[in-house]
Structure formats: structure tokens, C-alpha cells
Amino acid sequence: MIRICIHISDGFPILSLTLVTEPLRVANRELGRDRFGWDVVSDEGGVVSSSSGIQIETNPLPEDVPEAVILLSSYKPDRAATDPTLAWLRRMDRLGCLMGCVDTGALSFAKAGLLTVRPAATHPESMAGFQRQFPGSLFVDRMADFSPPRFSGAGGVSTLDMTLALIGHFTDERVARRVAEILTYKPPIEGWRPDAIPESIPRAVRDAVSIMDAHLSKCLSVAEIAQRVELPIWKLNRLFQRYLHTSPTSYYVDRRLARARDMLKNTSLPVGEVASDCGYDNAEVFSRAYRLRFEVAPSADRSL
């Protein structure tokens, strides 16, 4: 039997747990035997509450080595990256276990030093903050990644992609495809991102947005962006108003503030560092802009 150890902590996503265990159950049914077994564990065992309040009974961290570990972590990732968790992850890795993480579990993997050679798929909302905290770790903006001895999912339904890859690894692709069919699941469009600009929008606008996203900490002027996409400023303004219903300046500010909010909710970086990393040299200016956009002070809008 392939034994998979699923580590959870308070605030873990129940959807991800379901998208790990149900495909494994379906795979066992298709194979006609218990090819996969799983054990849900936490640092000390006992009852652990999900982000939606559903409680799961867990076992303590095991001493023996399973074939694979999956870390589901929490929506408060810094609190979930406890010393016992990190020590256990490092030990499992040293002993040759296949190591997987979902969504904010990538932060615990980075803290444990497990992302220096192989990457972790990371949710776009967490990407900037995690990269800022751990510049030497490999985070990739994709839905799922399977690069043994690492595998990962960015969270949400992409956990299913990760689990299907795991099933295919231990059996074959035919079984993984059959499990997907039974679950009425079709893989997403390649390169999908929740905040992607539709292909129907003119190339110049999409290029301008890409330039903005690449310069969130060291901001460019709208004139510089217009020059790079080879348009006069007035035409770039008109295209943004027509297709994105806002000006380039306002859109740029929204992207920077959205990144700031992601960092505040997913890291423990000081507010001043977050402001600087999002293109604000003056903390008071940043605070005013943040309050205007989200109707709350930056310091009061943290998840950590």
C-alpha cells in the first residue's frame, strides 16, 4: 500500500483535504484494491478545525516514513509553520519521502529549506509576499507542479491536478485519467490565472499591464509605459478607459495596493517594508491610499 501522510493545522482548507482524499478513494475503487492509504496528522494530534469550522480528528506526527507527505497548512501560514512541523518536514525529506504542499504550505516548505532546488506552485495572491520573504526559494505561478521529490498545488481546485499527478506517479496515467473522468473533471486551460487579462483585449493594453506587474516596487510613469508599448499617452488612456473602465494611473495604483494587501495578509513583514515593496517611499502616503481603497488601515488588515 502507498501510504500518504496529510499534515493539517488550524485554519486548513477543507476543500484541499477533500481533493486529496476523494481522488485517492476513487483510484482504489478503480484498481479494485486499497492501493492508497492515508493518515491525517497534526503536530500533537487531536481535533483540528478547518477554515470553515469543520473539525477533523488527527493523529500525532508519525516516526515511520510514508511514501508521500502532503502539507495543507493554513490561511495563517506563519502560525502554521511551527518548529515541530518544520523539523518533521526536514526529517521526512532526509529519509527520502516524496514531499508535497498546497497553497500556503509553500511557505512552510521555504522555511524548512525545501525549495532551493525544486519549486512549489504558489497562488498568485501569495506569490509576491513569499518571494519577498524567501528570495532564495523557488515559487512558481502555476496551478500545479510535479517535480519529484517535490509536488505541489496552488490551492483551490488545482489541488485536484496535484493529486491526479500523484496517482499517475504511483500507478499510471490511465488510472489518473479515469479518476478525472469519474469526478467529471477536465484540466483547466494552460496558463490560466484568476487575474489574467482576456485575449480579446488589445495587445497594447495587455502589454501595459504586464509592464506594470513587473514594476510594482519601482514604478514607471504612464509616459514610460506608453513609450514601451509604442502608443501616445492619450491613446493608451483611451484604450484603458474603453476596455478596463479606468485610467492607466488608477489601474496601476490598484495593482500595487492589491499586492500590498496580499503581502499584509500572507506575510509578517512590517507595514513599512510592504509599502516600500509596493512602490511607496512614504508610509503616510501609503496608509492614506490603502484606507481610501480598502476602507481600513494597513495595520488593521492583517491575517497574521
Image (spheres, grey):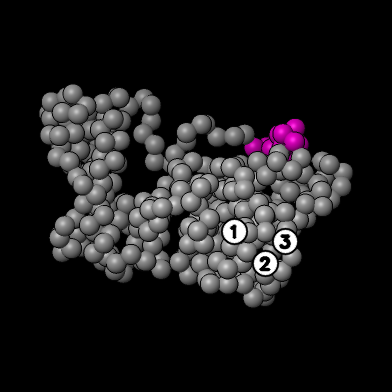
Disc 1 versus disc 2: distance between alpha carbons? 10 Å
Q: Earlier in the sequence, mark 1 or mark 3?
A: 3
Q: Nearer the viewer, residue 279 or 251?
A: 279
Residue 177 in magenta stretch: yes
Image point (53%, 46%), residue name: 118
Q: Nearer the viewer, residue 2 or 279?
A: 2
Magenta segment boundaries in residue numbering: 172-185
Compared to residue 47, the image places residue 120 above or below, namely above
Residue 87 in magenta stretch: no
User: Left or right: 189 with respect to 226?
Assistant: right
Disc 2 versus disc 3: distance between alpha carbons? 13 Å
Residue 274 image-quadrant placement: bottom left
Residue 254 - label: none
Residue 71 - label: 1
Element at badge 1? strand
- Residue 301 location (% of width, % of height): 33, 65
Asked whether the beta carbons under mark 2 and mark 3 sit within 8 Å of each other, the answer is no
Residue with the mark numbered 2: 41
Residue with the mark numbered 3: 65
